[in-house]
Image (cartoon, rainbow, N blue to C red):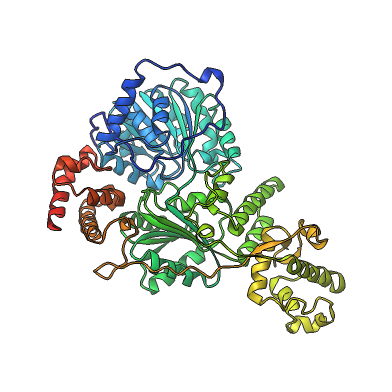
């Protein structure tokens, strides 16, 4: 096991985050007077941030959170993916005597998390089911001997009586509960094992606890606070805005071709994640990309565990590999250079969408969150809910989540602002300038008459023929288009036959999709038959106007190409042409080092750090050490090699 770091360090410097706000007010006895030694503690935290992690300054509320926990207080932290949550427990664990215990549901990623800490000189280990008995015993002995700074374990192991007894015999610096939203039964990612973590409050009353998550509405925030018994904790809520991510949602036409367009014109040679709803779709999409020369691997729960582990490992360690996955993949993935996240199917909730898209651009560099969305997505998701297991309350909750997701897809205003509102935050802008609705504002049209015609067709088919149909037959009736069913049922005799010929089939599908999203029309049953929805009455009575968006054509973007003929990495977009060549040289050096050490390239240096090195163009080890992301251990290990690579490009 690794030996420990010198007990000092430095944290992430980047664009400052919006200052956190308290959404759950502290009780009067939670607000403490200034403590003696606070200044010294703050200085020590800054030193750790600098010398161990290689950063110059804290972001947002990191310093306040670290002070709270290092001083022995509890904290509930809501901070977006890539916002620097891990530093909020790693640095206090280094400041306090004993070992920081990190509760995480991510057994498959613990080895990489520990390796990343070891790479910067932090003594770390994990206890989970992947260890042999003698390996687990060795880790336990290290814990008891005080030889670990951080120890990771899964919630189901931590709450075992044997584990609790082990921790009582050790010196514990703090208890960190990562992915804390998993405790919420109404959240998007509930894990029953998390419910047992409330025992920590009683078992370790004098040990500070910190609960962290990147995805929590105000309701989930309240629930996790209650279930983890952290009512007396300080609450820190950062802005959920991720300004480096460009949010785009396109009408679904030929989704795989649209995905290929995104990859080849904007993200060629870059890492990305593609989410699909079904295992079959994952496998066929991954193979479809491979057949077109795109490096891609599938990942879903139906694959053999060894295959899943291999594909995840290859994705983490390779540059430019795409993983095609169900939502079984991604939580805790700490790969900073994922340049795009694509959805070929509609997510079930905004929480899920936000967490999944948040896996792009963790390094703060420009990245894309792209989705292809169509009529079939709306119908199928509603059907899944109606046919699914669970109580009626559970289904109502699922419908509410889906309605919010549909509203995000169909909005004609800023998507980023709508995301923030969902999480209880108001945007400081009317237009973010980095989502499709802001970059290319959609045109709208008065669809009231069209909606009335469609509703009338549904009503006439039901009343006069006793029939309900899915979208295809209803649109055929509106267009006056004969088929076998219409001939058998004499649909041409209906007063609504052919009343919608002013719109094309594609336009009717677009209209119907938006009416479904607004509950003006509903899809019911196994076959998704259409019926008037709860919002249909005011439309039929002309009491409300229906404004719908005109679908935009999929965006076509052409990337600048390098002198070598490849697509320029988005990470290097801020660099001058000559600097981009230096960046590529450093990337190649990083890849060779990572292969030699059998670690992911980002564990050597992130793309953001490489950009910083190129911009600073250091000519000595001392000046290289001033670049954000270059800590003491990495400076000693890689400094001379980096300077040699730079001199070769002069």
Q: Nearer the viewer, residue 556 or 636?
A: 556
Residue in the picture at 43% in, 72% down: 288
- Image quadrant holding the C terminus, namely bottom left
Image x and y of residue 218, in percent: 59, 38
Please determine whether, in this image, residue 452 is positioned above or below residue 36: below
Q: Position of residue 174 (x, y in %)?
A: 40, 27
Occupied quadrant, residue 102: top left
Looking at the image, which residue sits at the far right?
A: 464
Camera sees residue 600:
no
Q: Residue at x 32, y 41 (%)?
A: 114
Q: How many badges with numbers are in the image?
A: 0
Q: Is residue 440 left or right of residue 337?
A: right
Q: Is residue 482 above or below residue 587?
A: below
| Front position in the image: 442 or 241 | 442
Q: Does 76 appear above or below 472? A: above
540 left or right of 319?
A: right
Quarter in which the N terminus is drawn: top left
Q: Is residue 51 among the parts visible in the rendering?
A: yes
Q: Residue at x 50, y 54 (%)?
A: 327
Q: Residue 226's spot in the image, x, y percent?
A: 58, 30
Residue 424 placement, left or right of 121: right
Quarter of the image for residue 592 reads bottom left
Where's residue 403, x and y in %? 65, 53
């Amino acid at each position: 096991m690794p030996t420990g770091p010198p007990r000092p360090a430095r944290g992430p410097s980047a664009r400052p985050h919006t200052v956190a706000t308290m959404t759950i007010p502290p009780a009067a006895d939670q607000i403490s007077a200034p403590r003696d030694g606070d200044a010294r503690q703050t200085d020590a935290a800054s030193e750790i941030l600098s010398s161990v992690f290689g950063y110059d300054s804290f972001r947002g509320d990191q310093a306040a959170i670290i002070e709270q926990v290092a001083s022995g207080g509890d904290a509930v932290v809501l901070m977006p993916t890539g916002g620097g949550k891990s530093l909020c427990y790693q640095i206090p664990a280094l400041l306090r005597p004993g070992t920081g215990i990190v509760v995480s549901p991510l057994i498959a990623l613990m080895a990489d998390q520990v390796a990343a800490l070891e790479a910067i000189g932090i003594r770390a280990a994990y206890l989970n089911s992947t260890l042999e008995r003698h390996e687990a015993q060795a880790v336990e002995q290290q814990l008891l001997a005080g030889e670990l700074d951080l120890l990771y374990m899964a919630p189901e192991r931590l709450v075992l009586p044997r584990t609790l007894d082990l921790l009582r015999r050790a010196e514990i610096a703090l208890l960190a509960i990562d992915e804390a939203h998993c405790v919420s039964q109404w959240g998007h990612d509930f894990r029953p094992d998390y419910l047992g973590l409330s025992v920590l409050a009683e078992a370790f009353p004098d040990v500070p606890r910190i609960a962290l998550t990147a995805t929590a509405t105000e309701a989930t925030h309240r629930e996790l606070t209650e279930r983890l018994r952290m009512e007396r904790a300080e609450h820190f809520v950062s802005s959920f805005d991720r300004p480096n991510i460009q949010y785009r949602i396109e009408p679904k036409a030929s989704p795989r071709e649209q995905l290929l367009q995104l990859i080849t014109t904007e993200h060629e040679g870059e890492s990305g994640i593609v989410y699909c709803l079904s295992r079959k779709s994952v496998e066929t999409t991954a193979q479809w990309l491979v057949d077109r020369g795109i490096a891609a691997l599938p990942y879903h729960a139906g694959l053999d565990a060894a295959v899943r582990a291999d594909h995840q490992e290859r994705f983490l360690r390779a540059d430019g590999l795409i993983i095609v996955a169900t939502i079984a993949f991604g939580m805790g993935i700490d790969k900073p250079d994922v340049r795009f996240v694509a959805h070929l199917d509609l997510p079930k909730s905004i929480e899920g969408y936000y967490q999944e898209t948040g896996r792009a651009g963790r390094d703060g560099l420009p990245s894309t969150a792209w989705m292809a969305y169509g009529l079939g997505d709306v119908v199928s998701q509603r059907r899944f809910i109606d046919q699914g297991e669970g109580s009626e309350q559970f289904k109502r909750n699922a419908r509410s989540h889906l309605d919010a997701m549909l509203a995000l897809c169909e909005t004609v205003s800023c998507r980023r602002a709508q995301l923030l509102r969902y999480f209880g935050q108001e945007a400081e802008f009317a237009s973010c300038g980095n989502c499709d609705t802001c970059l290319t504002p959609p045109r709208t049209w008065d669809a009231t008459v069209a909606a009335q015609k469609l509703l009338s067709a549904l009503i006439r088919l039901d009343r006069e023929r006793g029939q309900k149909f899915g979208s295809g037959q209803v649109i055929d009736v509106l267009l006056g288009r004969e088929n076998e069913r219409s001939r058998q049922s004499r649909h041409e005799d209906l007063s609504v036959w052919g009343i919608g010929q002013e719109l094309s089939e594609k336009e009717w599908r677009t209209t119907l999709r938006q009416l479904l999203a607004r509950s003006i029309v509903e899809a019911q049953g196994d076959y998704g038959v259409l019926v008037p929805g709860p919002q249909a009455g005011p439309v039929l009575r002309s009491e409300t106007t229906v404004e719908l968006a005109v679908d935009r054509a999929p965006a076509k973007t052409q990337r600048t190409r390098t002198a070598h003929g490849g697509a320029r990495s988005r990470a290097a977009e801020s660099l001058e042409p000559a600097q981009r060549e230096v960046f590529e040289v450093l990337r190649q050096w990083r890849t060779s080092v990572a292969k030699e050490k059998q670690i992911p390239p980002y564990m050597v240096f992130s793309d953001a750090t490489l950009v910083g090195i190129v911009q600073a163009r250091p000519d000595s080890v001392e000046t290289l050490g001033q670049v954000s992301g270059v800590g003491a251990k990495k400076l000693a290990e890689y400094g001379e090699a980096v300077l040699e690579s730079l001199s070769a490009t002069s």
